[in-house]
Image: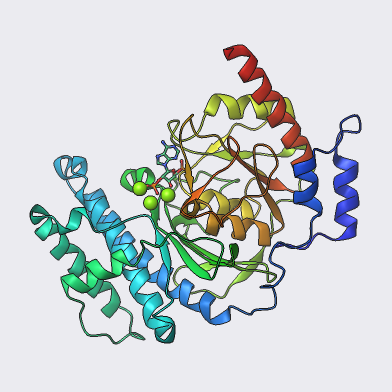
Amino acid sequence: MASISSGSLTRVLYSYPCKAKIPKPLYSLLFKKSPVVGVASMSYDKELAAAKKAASLAARLCQKVQKALLQSDVQSKSDKSPVTVADYGSQAIVSFVLEREFPSDSESFSLVAEEDSGDLRKEDAQETLERITKLVNDTLSSDETYSVSPLSANDVLAAIDSGKSEGGSHGRHWVLDPIDGTKGFVRGDQYAIALALLDEGKVVLGVLACPNLPLSSIGSHDQHSSQYKVGCLFSAKVGAGTDMQSLDGSPPIKVHVSAIEDPEEASFFESFEAAHSMHDLSSSIAKKLGVKAPPVRIDSQAKYGALSRGDGAIYLRFPHKGYREKIWDHAAGYIVVTEAGGVVADAAGNALDFSRGRYLDLDTGIIVTNLKLMPSLLKAVTESLNEKASSSS
Ligand SMILES: Nc1ncnc2c1ncn2[C@@H]1O[C@H](COP(=O)(O)O)[C@@H](O)[C@H]1OP(=O)(O)O
Ligand SMILES: [Mg+2]
Ligand SMILES: [Mg+2]
Ligand SMILES: [Mg+2]
């Protein structure tokens, strides 16, 4: 968690609209001590290195599948199996690599992940399972530092099913979304492999592999242009800041969220898919805040990565009524942004709580920005939500 200096606290106080009081939840979010007290002294270096390795290998597998998918004909594009193969393959690789890197922890190994092998164990899925097994073995053997004997189909099923943990507030739990942004993956756009570690209910490290994200800012150019080198790996560890490097192995650089204080200069990110987030609500909030730029719509937790390096200043996510957010959709992105100096809150200004199991039970939506913009953003969110509620009642 980024520490908040007394200087920045003063600036936050000044930036808050003077007539309004700072709401209680926001006050505790901005002013409380690091929530990782007790685990902050741990180093997690070995865990972070393993997470980077696992996510990079999974990204290699996904890139291969996406390339084949985009080159395929229309008929096989409408077939969902390529996505399925990549989702399962990515989860099997990450699970296998983590268990192998920490053999002594095998008794207590815990992974909370999106996929399970139920459908793959059905008789008509044999061919798909064989494809996944081959893909996993080809990917593992493509890494010259990794000499493993080939996995069987049963090994792959077991690796996928390691992800059934319920998480919680005690002990350590890895948290994985093997492909976040499936819709973007199929379209050939953004997606991410998102992996984090919880220790005693707190996110202590996170890695976001974003194979299609340009290494340079997407705030300043067309994110779809093929002119720019793509493939970013973001990594963050509690108390140590956020790094970015290219997926093909350049040295890491430290990244920081945007320092913009004037909403007129800010741009905001939201889901590409209107079914995932209410675009009309975001535009009402942005208007209230005085944001001039149109929204930047991209898929997946790549939004958290882009925000952590200051490509934009705000991320707004308001799923439609009834949708329950899962911890694997935010854990890695959360620490990547907070360690880069940002703040992540729900729509009521509460901190996100990753300690309650597989779901994140939160108030209405998720908002992300820097320390200076958060108070006025929260005010605009509250007003817009109140207006929406009164217009629908
Ligand atoms: N109806 C929905 N509302 C909100 N999010 C959804 C919905 N359906 C799936 N998602 C999840 O939203 C995330 C992507 O959001 P976005 O790209 O809009 O930021 C993914 O985690 C996706 O799952 P998945 O991991 O299966 O792709
Ligand atoms: Mg997801
Ligand atoms: Mg997913
Ligand atoms: Mg999914």
Of 125 and 265, the residue lying toward us: 125
Q: Quadrant of residue 92?
A: bottom left
Q: In the drawing, does residue 260 fall left or right of residue 198?
A: right
Q: Is residue 358 above or below residue 165?
A: above
Specify the quadrant that holds the N terminus. bottom right
Of 102 and 9, the residue lying toward us: 102
Is residue 373 in view from this perspective? no
Q: Is residue 341 above or below residue 102?
A: above
Q: Is residue 369 above or below residue 94?
A: above
Is residue 334 in view from this perspective? yes
User: Residue 50's x, y, as percent?
Assistant: 47, 77
User: Residue 291's x, y, as percent?
Assistant: 70, 31
Q: Quadrant of residue 34?
A: bottom right
Q: Residue at x 37, y 82 (%)?
A: 100
User: Residue 134's x, y, as percent?
Assistant: 18, 69
Q: Residue at x 79, y 56 (%)?
A: 32
Q: In the drawing, does residue 203 fall left or right of residue 120?
A: right
Q: Residue at x 51, y 43 (%)?
A: 222
Q: How is the image coloured?
A: rainbow
